[in-house]
Amino acid sequence: MKDTVSKPALEARLQAIGAARYHNLHPFHHRLHGGQCTPDEVRAWVINRYYYQSRIPMKDAAFLSRCEDPDMRRAWRSRIEDHDGGIDEGGGIRRWLKLAEAVGLDPDYVASGVGILPATRFAVDAYVHYVREKPLLQAVASSLTELFAPKIHAERIEGLFKHYDFANQSSMSYFQKRLTEAPRDVEYGLSWVLAHADTAEKEDAVCAALIFKTEVLWAQLDALWSAYVEPGRIPPGGWQPGEGLA
């Protein structure tokens, strides 16, 4: 079947989803990047975001286990390497733990997964399950929030350096590294999606997958806001300020 919609039109649909739904629009990020977060709000964000970071290579490993194309596996496996790194130097996960240490947390506590909000755990686990179970087209499309990531990383780097004493080259290394990693990842993913979404039904599925992923990211920030900003109701099992400090 021939394309029912041009590739530029599909890419425009994806960009429109990001413009309307990406989590750079969430008030928690405005608060964080604007320097209004308290130290404990920053710590809560670091702890909960770690759960997402730690599950990214697991998500990608699940994807690779279903991928029969060796060329695609070779292209995709760098995502795992980016986050897990080597035995000695580590990767994005270890760089995130440097941020945790900089904001006054015990990295071992953060890595333990203790204190993760129930809604964070639910949303992130749903993403891993989605990538493990959905057709490869939707699984790849769900990664395309990386289209919008460089902008938020640049805003975050600028805002955190400007407003917070903990920001330095070491603590911000995760975000600085993603400025080059994310564009590489999304170039491959976007090209693959545009090449394989060759019917109207598949195009709609691609857009639904990207919407799902934006909701995964948004839900995590909603949980943070409810627990630590307004109304400040920390659910059972959620991190309590004062716990897990270095």
Image: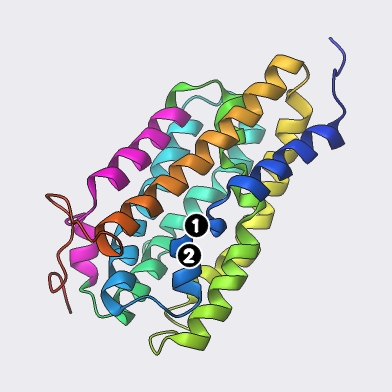
Q: Tell me the amino acid under the disc marked 2.
A: His
Task: For mark 1, give the secondary structure.
Answer: loop
Name which residue lies at 57% across and 64% down: 178
- Relative to 1, say whether 210 is above or below: below
Closest to the observer, 89 or 20 = 20
Per the rendering, the mark at residue 26 is: 1
- How busy is the neighbourhood of tag 1: few (under 14 within 10 Å), some, or many (20 plus)? some
- Relative to 55, say whether 229 is above or below: below
Closest to the observer, 116 or 172 = 116
- How busy is the neighbourhood of tag 2: few (under 14 within 10 Å), some, or many (20 plus)? some
Can you name the residue that lies furthest to the front here? 231
Name which residue lies at 29% across and 44% down: 119
Q: Is residue 164 left or right of residue 114?
A: right
Name which residue lies at 39% across and 67% down: 96
Per the rendering, the mark at residue 29 is: 2
The image quadrant of residue 3 is top right
Disc 1 to disc 2, C-alpha distance: 6 Å
The image quadrant of residue 241 is bottom left
Residue 100's spot in the image, x, y percent?
31, 72
The image quadrant of residue 46 is bottom left
The C terminus lies in quadrant: bottom left
Task: For mark 2, give the secondary structure.
Answer: helix
Closest to the observer, 86 or 125 = 125
Q: Which residues are magenta?
A: 107-131
120 within the magenta span = yes
Residue 102's spot in the image, x, y percent?
33, 81
Q: Is residue 159 visible?
A: yes
State yes or no: discs 1 and 2 in contact (Cβ < 8 Å).
yes
